[in-house]
Image: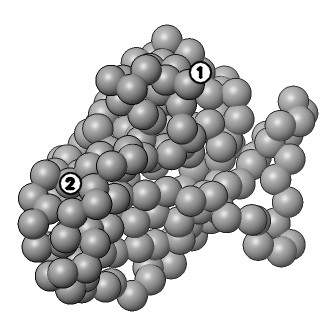
């Protein structure tokens, strides 16, 4: 159990950030599975680790996703949650097998932007290129929700939405 003063990982694993995604983001370790890579990329979005986002995807995708575009996105949103979902049929993830060159992770993300709660689901594809790399995904945007002023803030702070200006970081308990 992490120290109560230590930041929990943004990915919602319940582990300390320093024991979960941070070593991947800092380049001290390499993700051993597609899920680890996806979780570490989510955490990188949460803490604006743009270099890691560029390094952890395929070269073609890194060119498409400019650092300027990534910075613009992460500086305007506040991530509030990540959930892993079962892979849709007929997709099968065999990324744990050493001979497998491709893997998939299906997840949902929530974030606040302009006083609305946004969400999307993504079926991410990963490829093995001297380590797992994000190769893109199929994204489905879900309808945005405008929380009521007296509703609990979606960040999990326990405060009313109207009173929550410093939202809890993703993965944190109030």
Using the rendered image of the protein, determine whether residue 15 is visible from the camera's viewpoint: yes
Residue at 31% across / 85% down in the picture? 145
Q: Which residue is mark 1?
A: 30
Determine whether, in the image, residue 21 is placed left or right of residue 132.
left
The quarter holding residue 9 reads top left
Q: CA distance from mark 2 to mark 1?
A: 30 Å
**Place of residue 131 in the rendered image (x, y in percent of width and height, measured from the top left):** 65, 27
Asked whether 163 or 118 is in front, the reply is: 163
Residue 46, placed above or below residue 140? above
Residue at 20% across / 47% down in the picture? 71
**Place of residue 99 in the rendered image (x, y in percent of width and height, measured from the top left):** 90, 33
Determine whether, in the image, residue 132 is placed left or right of residue 58.
right
**Place of residue 104 in the rendered image (x, y in percent of width and height, measured from the top left):** 71, 54
Residue 15, placed above or below residue 106? above
* Disc number placed over residue 167 in the picture, else none: 2
Residue at 39% across / 47% down in the picture? 173
Residue at 21% across / 85% down in the picture? 148
Q: State which quarter of the image contains the N terminus.
A: top right
């Amino acid at each position: 159990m992490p120290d109560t003063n230590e930041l929990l990982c943004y990915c919602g694993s319940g582990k300390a950030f320093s024991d979960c995604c941070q070593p991947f983001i800092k380049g001290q370790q390499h993700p051993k599975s597609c899920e680890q890579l996806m979780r570490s990329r989510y955490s990188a979005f949460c803490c604006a680790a743009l270099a890691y986002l560029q390094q952890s995807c395929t070269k073609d995708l890194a060119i498409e996703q400019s650092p300027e575009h990534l910075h613009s996105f992460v500086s305007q949103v506040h991530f509030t949650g990540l959930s892993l979902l079962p892979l849709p049929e007929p997709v099968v993830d065999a990324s744990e097998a050493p001979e497998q060159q491709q893997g998939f992770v299906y997840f949902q993300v929530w974030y606040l932007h302009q006083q609305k709660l946004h969400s999307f689901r993504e079926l991410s594809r990963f490829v093995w290129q001297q380590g797992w790399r994000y190769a893109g995904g199929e994204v489905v945007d879900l309808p945005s929700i405008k929380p009521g002023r007296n509703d609990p803030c979606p960040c999990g702070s326990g405060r009313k939405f109207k009173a929550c200006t410093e939202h809890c970081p993703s993965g944190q308990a109030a």
